[in-house]
């Protein structure tokens, strides 16, 4: 089962639709204030996806506790707000982005990590955010996987030792042509964990 934490975002069900195209696993969606860590543990998901959402990671209900409890035990993908929550959990800070991005595409380069398997570098992806992970105190437990070509804003990260991944951009957007491939790569990484 794919367990998705919904941070009250309109894009959550686009992610559900994409994962439904890629996997026969059931997808269970829970609002960030409607499920506990114990309930997640009892459901024994194959992987966890933390959705985009408004505001800051500290406003994302159970999302940060999910990362603290399951990172290293269950593969996790954080998208936008979920990506920022991963950075905060491991000691990073969130700052205002260099540019306000709302439905704008950017050229993004990556480091050939398996999350980006068969995706060209650079690639185009859609961004919806005013906050970003701070590069100046980036956590040592994490590595930067991708950044914007224009201003080196961090666009993807991963834990150095286990399958916890974050992407700042929206792979589920129709204007992110490689988004489905990225989500498929995440599922492949889940299988090998």
Image (spheres, rainbow, N blue to C red):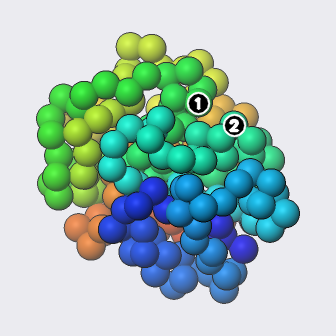
Against 92, residue 119 (above or below) is: below
What residue lies at 25% left-to-right and 57% top-to-bottom?
Answer: 126
Distance between the Cα atoms at labels 1 and 2? 7 Å
Q: Quadrant of residue 41?
A: bottom right
Question: Is residue 19 found left or right of 174 in the rendered image?
Answer: right
Question: Is residue 85 found left or right of 173 in the rendered image?
Answer: right
Against 62, residue 143 (above or below) is: above
Whether tag 1 and tag 2 are in contact, CB under 8 A, the answer is yes
What residue lies at 43% left-to-right and 75% top-to-bottom?
Answer: 13
Q: Quadrant of residue 143?
A: top right
Mark 1 element type: helix
Q: Position of residue 147 (x, y in %)?
A: 33, 37
Residue 97 in sight: yes
Q: Which mark is residue 16?
A: none
Instruction: Name the residue beneath numbered marker 2.
Output: 68
Instruction: Name the residue beneath numbered marker 1.
Output: 89
Observer-nearest residue: 139 or 147? 139
Question: Is residue 96 found left or right of 86 in the rendered image?
Answer: left
Q: Residues within 10 Å of mark 1 (few under 14, many from 20)?
A: some
Quarter of the picture containing the C terminus is bottom right
């Amino acid at each position: 089962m794919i367990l998705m934490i919904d941070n009250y975002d309109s894009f959550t069900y686009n992610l559900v639709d994409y994962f439904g195209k890629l996997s026969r696993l059931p997808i269970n969606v829970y609002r960030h204030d409607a499920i506990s860590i114990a309930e997640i543990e009892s459901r024994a998901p194959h992987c966890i996806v933390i959705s985009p959402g408004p505001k800051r990671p500290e406003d994302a209900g159970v999302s940060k506790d999910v990362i603290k409890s399951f990172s290293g035990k269950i593969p996790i993908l954080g998208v936008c707000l979920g990506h920022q929550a991963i950075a905060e959990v491991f000691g990073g800070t969130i700052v205002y982005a260099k540019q306000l991005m709302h439905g704008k595409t950017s050229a993004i380069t990556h480091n050939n990590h398996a999350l980006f398997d068969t995706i060209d570098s650079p690639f185009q992806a859609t961004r919806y955010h005013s906050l970003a992970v701070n590069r100046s105190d980036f956590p040592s437990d994490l590595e930067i996987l991708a950044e914007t070509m224009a201003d080196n804003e961090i666009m993807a990260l991963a834990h150095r030792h286990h399958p916890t991944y974050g992407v700042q951009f929206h792979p589920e957007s129709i204007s992110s042509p490689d988004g489905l491939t990225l989500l498929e790569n995440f599922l492949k990484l889940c299988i090998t964990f």
